[in-house]
Image (spheres, helix red, strand yellow):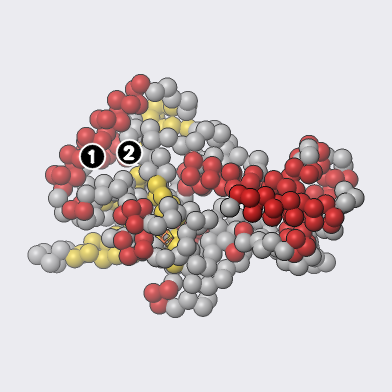
Amino acid sequence: MNKRQTAVQMDKNLNRREFIKTTAATTAGVATIASGITLTTYANVASENPVTNEKRWGMLIDTNKLTETDIDDMIDACQEEQGWGSEILSTGDQKSGWIKKIKVKDTATDRISNLALMCQHCEEPPCVDVCPTNASMKREDGIVLVDKHLCIGCRYCMMACPYDARSFVHEELTDQREHMPRGKGTVESCTMCVHKVDKGEQPACVEAVDSDAVIFGDLYDSNSKINQTLKKIQSAQIRADLNLNTAVRYSGI
Amino acid sequence: MNRWLMVLFSLMTTTVFAHTDSDSHANLGDRATELKEAGESKNIHPDLTEIRIMHPDFMMHKRDKTLRQGVRTKRNSLKACVNCHSSTDKNDEYIPINQQGQFCSTCHQKVGTSLDCFSCHRSTPKEDL
Ligand code: SF4
Ligand code: SF4
């Protein structure tokens, strides 16, 4: 992993964004809670305005703090929130997996870290590049989604994803979650709980972890905890060599 | 392409009108029936002809706004349609809205247009409604 390159790239982006941010008026209420860290609150109503690229949602996962039980809790929370995982006819690789527990071993030292791996919400997502129908898409605020209205189930995006983050639904489903349409013949993956984020809430898997091993927030907001933590500590992207500039970052690996 | 769409449209609308020439619908759904009886339906669908003909366009527009731009208002949201137009059976359980005899399928069957919303979308209101 090329950490230095990651850091430089991140910095460049933050600076550019900070510039844009200072020139744009902000409508959210901001409260200072501790030494420069601010808590941004949003009214819990649906916004009439489209999301913009003044924000970029991201996550920082601290693998030193994240226990294996935490990861299991994250997976359970995701299944419960989004309604995947109870497919009865799908077997083996056909099963959906939006978030997975991954063990990585440093071959030189035999040190093992456990990761929660989901869609990394790349700034340059390969799944979007390869999609023939424009179904695989990135929102202005950096969240990568599948527009199932347009998905033809070709699965190119599954091949293109370096993180194996996407699943294909192999069977007919009923009783989906109201906010999460899912159906046979389409591809799906972590939505960064976009339905919650749009309401000003945190993703379900982040809420499921008691410690601050997983931080969610706006990468561009210099007052956000995630931005400040990323400035202070060593963090990495998985497969940083691909230059995808992921929104999910890891520390302690 | 557009010409054929127009032909299809006019065919569809004439059949819809033939089907619902009085202002009634075979199965309006529980909540929608209540609202209609309370005289509220005009506040939701001011023009019945418009919603009958244009609902696919409204929903198409809304789906792009919601999914691609994060605009999650209730207006023209499929959830809101399902919430009002679903019926319950004698055990008080919701019947999927696309099942035979239910709100969506009665018209769609009549005019022979298939309905694919509910292979992905939830076809009943959320449990705790
Ligand atoms: S499976 Fe769907 S989202 Fe993926 S590349 Fe094909 S059409 Fe696009
Ligand atoms: S952000 Fe939401 S969809 Fe993504 S892994 Fe976490 S719980 Fe699942």
Residue for point 87% across, 42% down: B38
**Chain identifier of the residue bearing label 1 in the image:** A
Q: Amino acid at mark 2?
A: Leu
**Is disc 1 in contact with disc 2, using a CB cutoff of under 8 Å?**
yes
> Picture coordinates of residue A92 (x, y %)?
40, 77
Residue A228 location, x and y as percent? 28, 35
Asked which secondary structure carries label 1, the reply is helix
Is A62 left, or right, of A241 in this rendering?
right
The vertical placement of A37 against B81, above or below, is above
Query: Crowding near pointer 1: few (<14 within 10 Å), some, many (20+)?
Result: some
A57 vs B128, left or right, is left
> Residue A45's x, y, as percent?
58, 36
Name the chain under label 2: A
B119 up-or-down from A133: above or below: below
What label sits on residue A219 in the rendered view? 2
- Is the CB atom of the residue marked by disc 2 within 8 angstroms of ligand 2's nearest atom? no
Viewer can see residue A206: no
The residue positioned 56% from the left and 71% from the top of the image is A172
Going from the N terminus, do you reach mark 1 or mark 2 first?
1
Q: Nearer the viewer, residue B13 or A96?
A: B13
> Residue visible at 42% across and 22% down?
A25
Q: Residue furthest left?
A: A108
Quarter of the image holding residue B42?
Answer: top right
Q: Amino acid at mark 1?
A: Met
Locate residue B129 relative to residue B73 in the image: left or right: right
Q: Is residue A144 visible?
A: yes
What residue would you read off at disc 1? A10
